[in-house]
Image (tube, grey):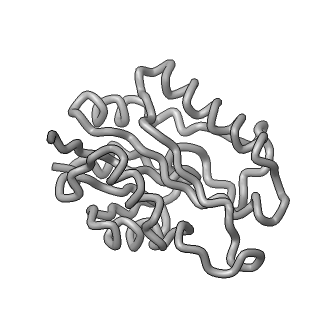
Amino acid sequence: MRLNKAVFLDRDGVLNKELGDYVCKLEDFHILEHNFMALKELQDKGYLLIVITNQGGLAKGWYSESTLAKMHEKLRETYQQHGVTFTEMYYCRHNPLYNGNCLCRKPGSIMLEKAIARFNVDKTKSYFIGDRERDVIAGQAAGVTGILIDSDQPISEVFHLIV
């Protein structure tokens, strides 16, 4: 069976503009255009692109599943216009203040582990790009290399870390 390589991507601060708190409205969801070419290049090199994001604002009631679905639809459609396809988007809807500790919320690695199993991912050739330490911890716990970037930093600036 052929193994796939993947780049896992946090959402806020990596694919769309970081607001410092939750993105609660579609009109506040601003996609980072400087990553179109970088992600297309990774995809062209054979990497699956898989989004892994905490969305604890759902548990807080700050936005709905419907609003989140619209944000993800906008994300998919906008990147698709630039030739980039996200293989899948995983999100944790829990918040520790409302749900206690869950296994899926980063720094937990369950979302990554599900994607690794589902898409037959070779962990040794895969990466998790995120703008928070919890992203790197989740990646490492799942056996992939974590790459920490600054919020809204162009992904092309860390290409040298991806083999």
| Residue at horizontal 38 percent and vertical 46 percent from the top | 155
Q: Splitting the image into 4 quarters, where does residue 124 fall? A: bottom left
Q: In the rendered view, does 104 fall on the left or right side of 62? A: left
Residue 100 image offset from top left, x and y in percent: 69, 81
Q: Splitting the image into 4 quarters, where does residue 53 fall? A: bottom right
Q: Splitting the image into 4 quarters, where does residue 70 fall? A: top right
The answer to whether 144 is drawn above or below residue 66 in the figure is below
Return the residue nearer the eye: 62 or 12.
62
The answer to whether 53 is drawn above or below residue 29 in the figure is below
Residue 153 image offset from top left, x and y in percent: 45, 51
Query: How many numbered markers are drawn?
Result: 0
Residue 39 image offset from top left, x and y in percent: 37, 35
| Residue at horizontal 21 percent and vertical 33 percent from the top | 45
Return the residue nearer the eye: 40 or 47.
47
Q: Quadrant of the image for the N terminus?
A: top left
The answer to whether 81 is drawn above or below residue 69 in the figure is above
| Residue at horizontal 41 percent and vertical 69 percent from the top | 138
